[in-house]
Amino acid sequence: MEKKVKKRAVKEIRVEIPQFITHVPTSKTKFMKINGQRLYSGLNPHIRAKIVTELHNYVRPFINAEMKKKGSDITSLSPLHIRLEFHAPINYGDVRRIKGTIRWKEPADDYVASWDVDNMWIWGKTFNDTLTEEGHIKDDSASFVRASGEVKWVPVDTFDERKLVFIITKCV
């Protein structure tokens, strides 16, 4: 018999995804780096749908584990404000997948970032849609999610320290 978890009201829910994936498969041998601009700029709609499905499947267990662990009632926070902290090294834009291996090297002291933080919006869209698919929220329309899409880059020293942190609070 499954034990019923008592739900409790909370002020904030944090869903952390350590060492997040950087690439998703587009075929058996090809991978594409996760980047919102690339995803919606001239990409075949079938490949786009495959990538989005892969991202939903990837974030789903992290969302469900956090909701189950805390027994949190997300509806107590409604309307929601959902934001993303994107923890990555300054040279995250230079991460490559070559022959099945992720390649990253420590940046030089004078390295200047050339990647756009706002291109990580696809993670937020995926997160919100998965919250809905899993029944944690009724839907992700403006009636339930009043603020979303904020991406804040948090610099970390190494590639292994990378993580995504989704923060859900009540929108005021």
Image (cartoon, grey):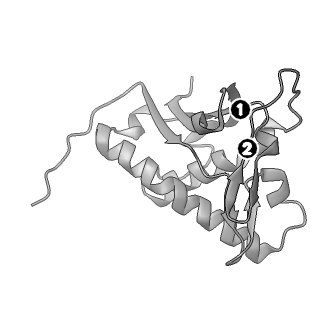
Q: Image quadrant of residue 89?
A: top right
The secondary structure type at the circle numbered 2 is: loop
Tell me if I can see residue 80 in this picture.
no
Q: Which residue is mark 2?
A: 104
Image quadrant assignment for residue 97: bottom right
In the drawing, does residue 9 fall left or right of residue 13? Answer: left
Residue 33 image position (x, y, % from top left): 75, 56
Q: Quadrant of the C terminus?
A: top right
| Quadrant for the N terminus in the image | bottom left
Q: Are there few (<14), some (14-19), or many (20+) residues within 10 Å of tag 2?
A: some
- Which residue appears at 58% of the width and 41% of the height? 145
Residue 71 image label: none
Place residue 134 in its image quadrant.
bottom left
Badge 1 crowding class, 10 Å Cα cut-off, few under 14, some 14 to 19, many 20 or more, is many
Q: Residue furthest left?
A: 1
Could you tell me which residue is drawn at 65 percent across and 38 percent down? Answer: 159
Q: Secondary structure at mark 1?
A: loop
Q: Say which amino acid is labelled 1.
A: Pro
Residue drawn where x is 87% and y is 27% of the image: 111
Q: Position of residue 109 (x, y in %)?
A: 83, 21
In this picture, residue 74 sits left or right of residue 89: left
Residue 155: tell me if it is visible. yes
- In the displayed structure, 83 sits above or below 110; it is below
Residue 20 versus residue 54: which sits nearer the camera? 20
Nearer to us: label 2 or label 1: 2
Is the Cβ of the residue at disc 2 closer than 8 Å to that at disc 1?
yes
Query: In the shown orientation, is residue 127 left or right of residue 157?
Result: left
Asked if residue 110 lies left or right of residue 89, the reply is right
Give the residue type that dot 2 points to: Trp
The residue that mark 1 highlights is 89
Residue at 36 percent across and 48 percent down: it is 65
